[in-house]
Amino acid sequence: MQAFVDRYKRELSAALAYAVLVIVVGIVTPSFLGAGNLRDLAMNNAAVLLVAIGMTTVIVSGEIDISVGSQFAVCTYLTGALAKEGMPIVLVLPCVVIAGVAMGAVGGALVAWLRMPSIVVTLALMVAWRDGLRWATEGAWIQDLPANFQWVGLGQTKGELILVGITALVFVAFAWALSNISGGRSFYAVGSDAEAARLAGIDPRRVVFSAFAITGALVGLAAVLNATRFSIVPSNAGMGLELKAIAAVVVGGTAITGGRGRLAGTLIGVALLGTIGTALTFLGINPFWEKAIQGAVILAAVMSDVALGRMAAWRISNFGLRARTGT
Amino acid sequence: MNSTIPRTRDLKLTAAWPARVFPNHEWVLLLVLFFEIVVFSIAGDNFFTAANAFEITRLSVEVGLLALALTFVIITGGIDLSVGSMMGLVAVVLGALWRDAHLPIAVAAGIALLLGLAGGALNGSLIARFNLPPLIVTLATFSLFRGVAEGITRGIENYSSFPSGFLFLGQGYIGGIFPAQLILLLLAIAGCAWVLHRTAFGRSLYAIGHAPDGARYAGIDVGRKLFFVYLFSGLAASVSAVIYVAHLGQAKSDAGTGFELMAIAAVVLGGTSIFGGRGSILGTVLGLFAIVVLQNGLRLSGQPAELAGILTGALLLLTVALNRIALFGPSVRTEETSEELDVKNSQVAILSAVILLAALLVAGSNWLLVRSLKQNGSPVVPVASSVSEKKLTVAMMPKAKGDPYFASCRKGAEEAARELNVDLLWDGPTDLDPAKQNEVVEAWITKGVDVIAVSVENQAGISTVLRKARDKGIKVITWDADSEKDARDFLINQATPQGIGYTLSDEAARMMNGKGEFAIVTASLSAANQNEWIKNIRERLAEKYPDLKLVTIQPSEGDRDRAFSETQTILKVYPNVKVIMAIAAPAVPGAAEAVKQAGRTDVKVTGLSLPNMNKPYVKTGVVESVVLWNTVDLGYLTVQAAYALGSGTLKRGDSALKAGRLGTVQVVNDEVRLGAPFIFNKDNIDRFDF
């Protein structure tokens, strides 16, 4: 038991916070736990979860990607544009995923092979993708899509099942791969110590590159799935998505300095941050305080490190400082 | 990990002077800056003038102060994302202390600076004392500071009418030309350069950035130094906020939104390594001006603002890539061996490539500019060559270019511009951003346009600049939303806030038969227009519909998906709600989709939005009606009025204006009236396409 707590203490503290939130709100307003609300929460956070899965691989590799929100906007618009051209959605999906991979690959290549700092690269790309999209679209939305665009023509119930099903499938596949196959473990190896990974026969550049490319693919998938929930496609989707995803990953216990973290934690992080806003409305708390409370939750999550053991925290972030200056 | 080894270049004080003055190839930026100035002097109107040079520096003071502080932070290997949010918090606290607590402005500013120090101390202690990663800590306080600012003002409060002595700090000129706040920036630059490059404290920051453990072993108190760095960052953010408030004449919780990214971009562009241990104040200053001059120059050449974002991104990638290659060699593995740095020839070759690429970049934009100039310069068909002495230039600004509402206004504006053969400049912030609006107007004054037409995001903020434009003989029109009355010649009034609020209330009352609960989904909680409408809705309810109950107001942040999820929650928490009133264009389709998916046929949606994006919902009956005016006509009328005003046919006291296809339009005092708000419903919506 002690070993279990030690092993999962970061995830456990986030899970505990989530449990407290759900129970408190559930007691005060029981309808919060109604099937309808839980379903809506799942639907509204599925896209964030997909992006956060990609973000986890990037952060575990010791990098960061703040261009995902802009990538999401481009992919969403592309989904609508292709569907409007009459392309069936089964073909749109791979096309948009490829576009996502391409955008992720631009960042990945610059970071991996030119060894440019990922925060700078993706900052530049974040501005460039979104301003490029604005320039091209001038803010126009895509309307008059074919009738079978929404829910892929299957109707709401089946469509929602597909969305949640695909997200769950991706989550399970990645959770398994990250801990059980060598490709997944190599993210941790590179994030812990790129030089050691290289000496062990792993090419850090390829690992970092694939983390960005995979994230791009997941952003593309998330964009298509999210777009098909509606009958109109906006040109400004995904505002602030990068911060949501990064915050969720970090709240879920993944070390921002790389090398450590689990997807289970990311899932809890997405759930926790994605629920706060809704919970506040259920509790009748003024929405003006939402951002402040979210900030406090992130702080509390990182501070729990300190509470859970000064020693471990010291070791980790001390390592982290070195990793920041080095890789 | 290898860059923790100190580079000999940094340590060798006896190096040749270019390496000493420009340790991080800052001279590349100097070249870029030089190219920018040359290109824009040719392509831009009135770019190369002393007045414009001062204007550029004035606009860069706020971001500049943040960038200076961030240079320190980033050299230690840290980051501070919270500075922009800190500005928002300091701004509203300053406003509250002055207006509500009736403190003298100097005392209020002093307390505001203390607040900045406290915020910096919070970041600093978490990072230095608890060894938490700076990225996370400041990501959390980024959210926290802005959230507290919104919380205490409820997003609505907008403090303005500050004393003129205080406003001088941000708007005044010393000796008629020298911007007041520039002195502060120059002092800050000198001070920072001295501390960073000439004191033991400054050197120790480099040591910490290179290798925190090594610095500790060398007897440097790492925690204490880091704490001071973040403390300084908080102070810089608060000084910046005070100047921002004085500059815009208003304090609101959205002050400084996005400034952190621009400041970080300037620092990194200036050659400071994001990993720490390398960088200079000179680089930051050059990086800052490279960005600001680019933005200003593009504006004066009539290029869209998005291009500035794309080019800044490209410039950033390019300089960092080349810096990287120049410092470490093209391959990762040569890093260990290149310690001697005796690769002079290859470095020369690479640096030549830098210049070449920078030149290409600038030449590319140059080509674009010259091409567009040619297009603008030669009228395709001289319509009435005998009459036209000089083509009128009308500069028209939306609140946000990315908003479909304004995209449809633009359609009408361009239609009128073609008919009247005027040059139409259409530019503005990409998202709601009052500071950006001021910048664009300043640029237009410098450029020397004939008429400026602005959709005002913030009254108090923009009125000073508009008055300045009028002083220079430029005609000023406001459209869509008004400035202070004496700051413009005419207002193109599409509908008053009262008209909108009352029409929306009447629609809701009609749908609910005068009784029941309804909810509002607004834009952002601090949006000025929406808050004004909500005020009028409440008035109307109190006066005429006492049985209508407004149960909640939720934000959508102008995001359709957010409006969707907020509406879902509203429907569950307030099951008796009969009408969702969405008062932002993207929020109506979001709310409608949520109602539709919830299967709540008993709930109706209404609100303020564009007909096109709501057609499917109006036709299926989810959206009962959409209230708006004809936005294409609004754009059309604005350019018509601008033309009439610019050519002298429209004067104060007129009671009518001939406006092309709109026929004769009513003019009342200083307002040109488009007409009453229009209600789009199932029967008439197909007649409109915007």
Image: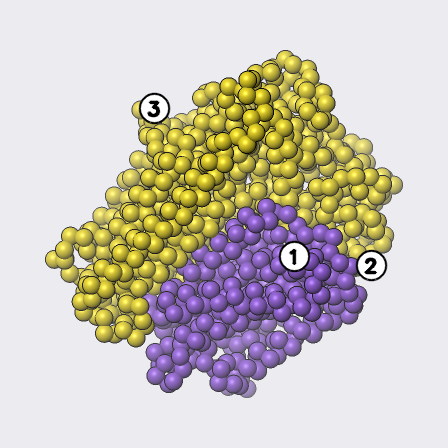
Q: Residues within 10 Å of mark 2 (few under 14, many from 20)?
A: few
Disc 3 element: loop
Residue B267, position as x, y percentages in the image: 35, 52
Viewed as shown, does residue B636 lie left or right of B390?
right
The Cα atoms of the two marked residues, 2 and 1, are separated by 28 Å
Going by the picture, which residue comes out furthest to the left? Answer: B14
Going by the picture, which residue comes out furthest to the top? Answer: B653
Disc 2 element: loop
Q: Residues within 10 Å of mark 1 (few under 14, many from 20)?
A: some
Circles 1 and 3, Cβ within 8 Å, touching? The answer is no
Q: Amino acid at mark 1?
A: Ala
Label 2 marks which chain's residue? B
Shown in yellow, the chain is B
**Residue where numbered disc 2 is placed:** B599
Viewed as shown, does residue B250 lie left or right of B573?
left
Label 3 marks which chain's residue? B
**Of the numbered discs in the image, which one, if any, rests on residue A81?**
1
Disc 1 element: helix
Circles 2 and 3, Cβ within 8 Å, touching? The answer is no
Residue A77 shows in this picture: yes
**Residue where numbered disc 3 is placed:** B176
Q: Amino acid at mark 2?
A: Gly
Are labels 2 and 1 on one chain? no
Task: Name the tint of chain A in the rendering.
Answer: purple
Are labels 1 and 3 on one chain? no
Q: Amino acid at mark 3?
A: Gly
Residue B367, position as x, y percentages in the image: 42, 44
Residue located 71% across and 54% down the image: A232
